[in-house]
Amino acid sequence: MNPNEFDVIIIGGGITGAGTQRDCAMRGLRTLLVDRSDIATGATGRNHGLLHSGARYAVNDPESAAECIRENMILRRVAAHCIDESDGLFVTLPEDDLDYQKSFVQACRDAGIRADIIDPDLARRLEPAVNPDIIGAVRVPDCSVDPFRLCAANMLDAKLHGGQVRLQTEVTGIIKEGNTVKGIRTHNRNTGEDLDFYAPIVVNASGVWGQEIAQMAGVKVGMFPAKGSLLIFAHRVNNMVINRCRKPSNADILVPGDTVCIVGTTSSRIPLEECRNVAVTPDEVTLLITEGIKLAPRLSSTRILRAYAGVRPLVSADDDPSGRNISRGIVCLDHETRDGIKGFITITGGKLTSYRLMAEMATDMVCKKLGIDKACETAITPLPGSEEGSYEEVAKKIWENPTVAQKAAAARMGSRVARIRSGDRRDEALICECEQVSMGEINAAIDRLEASTLTDLRRRTRVGMGTCQGEFCACRAAGLLAKAHGCIEKERADIDFFLQERWKGNFPIGWGDTLREAEYTQWVYKHVLGI
Amino acid sequence: MRFDTVIVGGGLAGLIAGISLQKAGKSTAIVSTGQNALHFFSGCFESIQEAPQQVLDIFNEAGIRVHYKPGVRLMPMGTFKESALSLDDVSLFPTPQFGKRVLIINFMGYHDFFSSFLAEGLEKQGMECRIRFLTLGELTQPELGPNEMRAVQIARKMDDVWEKVVQEVRVLLKDEDTVILPQVFGLKDASVPTRIRQGIPAQVVFAGTLPPSVPGIRTQMQLKKRYEVLGGTYLMGDRVTGAHVYQDVVQNVVTKQLDRHYLEADHFILASGSFFSKGLVSNPFKIYEPLFELDMDYNQDRNTWYNPTFANHQPYMGFGVKTDANLQPSRKGVPVKNLYVIGSILGETHPELGSGAGLAIRSALKVTELITK
C-alpha cells in the first residue's frame, strides 16, 4: 500500500478536524490530518472554554440550544477529564429587564435545558463572587472545558486508531482530476519538504481559513470572520459560569477554568486578511473590564494575566455574498451536490460544544460516499484519559498520597497520567512551578502529543500559562525540547517566539503586576541570560 | 529615631549610598523590603566603562572580589556580551575564543543551567565541548528533592561539599584546557570560586544560572554586613508606608514594622527601585511614585508605554521620577528641599549616569557628595 494514500484526508487541526479524524478512524478509515501550524491554534483555543448548556442560545436560536444541551450531556461522559462540571448562573442586574427571565426560562425548557429560577440569596451563596446587587438568577447546566486538552485527546485517539497526524504542514494545493478531488499538495514548514497525499475524500475543516482551501478546490465558501476579544484573570474568582440574563451582548460571560477565569467576548467583523494576526485594542480591554466587573466585582482587584482574541468561523450557508444569511449553526457542505466537485466536503460554523456532532455529520457524509456502513460511536466511547472517573480517583489509583503536582497532572491528563510514572524521581522535577508541570509530563507531550515548540507545549501541558507567564519554565522546557530534537539553534528562535507571543497578550493589559513581571522578564532575558 | 540620612530601599544604590555616607561620618538608616535587583544580578556591573578608585575601595573593603578588564563575558545561554567591571566569579576575555577544548559540568536533574546551549554557543566559536553530569549524593538526599534543584538550594549544599566537586572534575578532566561550572559556589564564602580555580588544573569559567543569582545574593550580604560594620542601621524586611512633608521639607517617614515611631532625618534618599520593586506603580490611567507622589517624567498616554515587539526598547522602562541636575525631585512643580532620588527609579531620565548597576552606583556617589558637602 502506498504510504501517501488514505481513505480520507482532513485539513485543519482544530477541534472539528481532530474530532472528525477520530470519528473516521474509529469507523475503520485510514486517515491523515494536516495543519499548517499546531492543534487548537485557531478558534478552538481562542474562546471562553465554555461548554454551553445551550441556555445562551435558547431565545434566539432554539435549534442550536437543543444541540448544545445534547452534546453537553454526552461530553460530560466521554470527555470527563477535559470538563469541569461547574454549573452556570444567568443573573439579572438592576439595570437589566427582569421580564426577560421569564421568556428565557421558557425557551430553555422548550429546548430541553433544565433552567431553575433561584432566589438571588441562594445564588450569592452558591457563587460568592457574583455581583451582590443581582435581582434575579437562573441556574443552568453550563460547564467549563479545556479546549486544548479536548483537542489533544481527540488527536491521540485518532492516532491510537491508526490515524496519521502531520503538523506544521501547509496545504499548497488541491489535486484534482476533472471535477474530482484526488488529494492535497503540502509543504512542511519545519523541514521544507513538499509532499502529495491522496484520498478519495478530502474534508475541509480549516475554520475561518476554509474559504482559501475551498478556493483551491475551485468552490466558493463565503466566510464572515468575527473577532472576539477576551481577558484571562490570574485567579479563579468564580466557581460557576456567570452569564448576564439579557439579550446576548458584549462581555457578558465569565467562565472559570483551571486556576484562572475568563471574561468575554466582544464581537466585530474583520476582513479575512486580518485573521492570522488579530490584536486586542485598548477600547476592547476597557469594555471587557467594565462589563466583567458587573458580573463579579472582585475582578476589579484581580490581576489580568493576558488579553487575546479569536476569530469565529461564521459562514453563509448558501451562495449569498452579502452575508445576510450568516448562521451560527453547523454548516456541512457536500460540494458534489452543491458545486459539482466530487470528493470534497466542508464542515464549519458550529461551536466548540457541538464539535462532536459536527464530526459525526462530516464522517457520516464521508462514509456514505465511500459506501461504508458503520455507526458512529463517539457519543459512547470515552476519549483517552476519560475512562476512569475524576482526576482525584485517577491520582489515588496511581499514587498512595498524591502530591499537588501529581493531582494537577492527573487533572490535565486523566488516566493517561499513569504513563508518565517512570519510577525515576528525576522525572518529577518541576519545570513549571505556577502550573505544577513535571519533566515527565513535558517529555510525554513531546513524545506522544506531537509537541515541537514551547507554544505547542503550552497548549498541551499548560506550561507557561500561570501567573509568571513562562518566566523561567520557558527556558527549562526549551532545554528539554532541545534534548528531544537535538537542535539548539531552533530552540533559541523558539524562545524568542515564545517571549514575543507572551508579550503580545501582555502589553494590552500592561499595568500593575503585569508590568512588574514584564520589566523583570526584560532584565532576566536581556541582561542575565543574554537573549 | 533620628539619623543624619534615611535611605528608602536597600538594593545596590541604597547600600552604596549608605556605606559611603557612613564612611563620611554620617549616621544613616536603610529601610529594605529584603528583595532587590541584586537577587538576579548577572555578576557584571553594567554601564561602568571605567573603574573609579572610590568604587573599587568600597568593594574591596566589603570583601567583594571584583576585577576590571574590558572584554567579553560568557552568558548563560552560550552567547557573549561586552563587559568591564565584574565580580571575580565572572571571567572576562579579550575575545570569545577563550579555549580550545571545553568540559562543561552540570548536576544531574538540574534544569536551571543550560549546558547544551552553552556547548552550542561555544562550538560556534570553534571550541570543542564535552558535557558531563555530576551525580552527587548530597543533591539527591530527601531534603533536596527534585523540586528543590534551584540555584540557592544547591549553593547551600555546595558551601559544604565544593571540594568534592573539585575532585570529581579532576577525575573527569581529560585533555580539556577549560572547565565550565554553574555559578552556584561561594554563597557564604566569597573565596570559594578562587579556591576552585586553584584546585582544577585548567582554566575555570563560571556561567550563570536562572535566578536567584548566587553571586548577587552573596554581594548583597557582603554590602549589608559592611554597612552594619560601619555603624549603619539596616531595617530588614520592613517597608516605608508613609512620609510627612512640611513646607517642602521631608520631616519623617513611617514604616510598617516601627509602628508609631517615626524615622526623622536631615536628608532622605529614595532608592526604592522601579516597577519590579514597587518604587514606581502603574495602573491603567497613570504611572506614579507612591510614597511622596513626586513629579514623573513620562508620557501619560498608555498607548505610548509599550513597543509591541518584546525584543525592542520598551518606553515604560525609560520612565522615572523627574529630578534636577542634583537628583532632587519636585512635587507639583515645587522642589522637595532635602530629598534625593537614586538608582533605577530614575529610569532613563539621566542617561549620563548610565543604566543598571552603573546608574545605581554613580547616582549614589553623586548624592553622597552633595549631602556631605
Image (tube, helix red, strand yellow):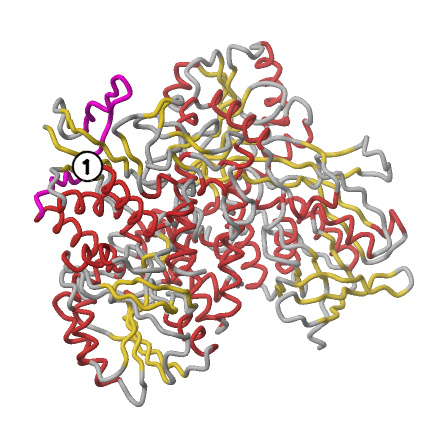
Kind of residue at disc 1: Val
**Is residue B238 magenta-colored?**
yes
Q: Which one is nearer the viewer's eye here, A238 or A378?
A: A238
Q: Count residues near mark 1 (Cα–Cα under 10 Å), then give few for <14, some for 14-19, many for 20+.
A: many
Q: Which one is nearer the viewer's eye here, A329 or B101?
A: B101
**The residue positioned farthest toward the bottom in the image shown:** B175
Query: Does the magenta stretch mainly form a helix, a strand or a loop?
Result: strand
Relative to A52, A223 lies left or right? right
Residue A455 lies, in percent from the top left, at 52, 55
Q: Decide if residue A305 is in sight here.
A: yes
Residue shown at 46%/82% (left/top)?
A: B126
Provide the residue designation for mark 1. B31
Image vertical order of residue A421 relative to residue A51, above or below: below
Image vertical order of residue B299 relative to residue A147, above or below: above
Q: Decide if residue A85 is in sight here.
A: no
Residue B56 lies, in percent from the top left, at 22, 59
| Label 1 residue SS | strand
Q: Which one is nearer the viewer's eye here, B371 or A455?
A: B371
Relative to A425, B114 lies left or right? right
Relative to B318, B2 lies left or right? left
Image vertical order of residue A150 relative to residue A157, above or below: above
Residue B264 lies, in percent from the top left, at 15, 27
Q: Which region shows up in magenta?
A: B230-255
**Is residue B360 magenta-colored?**
no
- Viewport quadrant of the N terminus of chain A: bottom right
Residue shown at 41%/16% (left/top)?
A: A132
- Viewport quadrant of the C terminus of chain A: bottom left
Residue B144 lies, in percent from the top left, at 20, 61
**The residue positioned farthest toward the front in the image shown:** B373
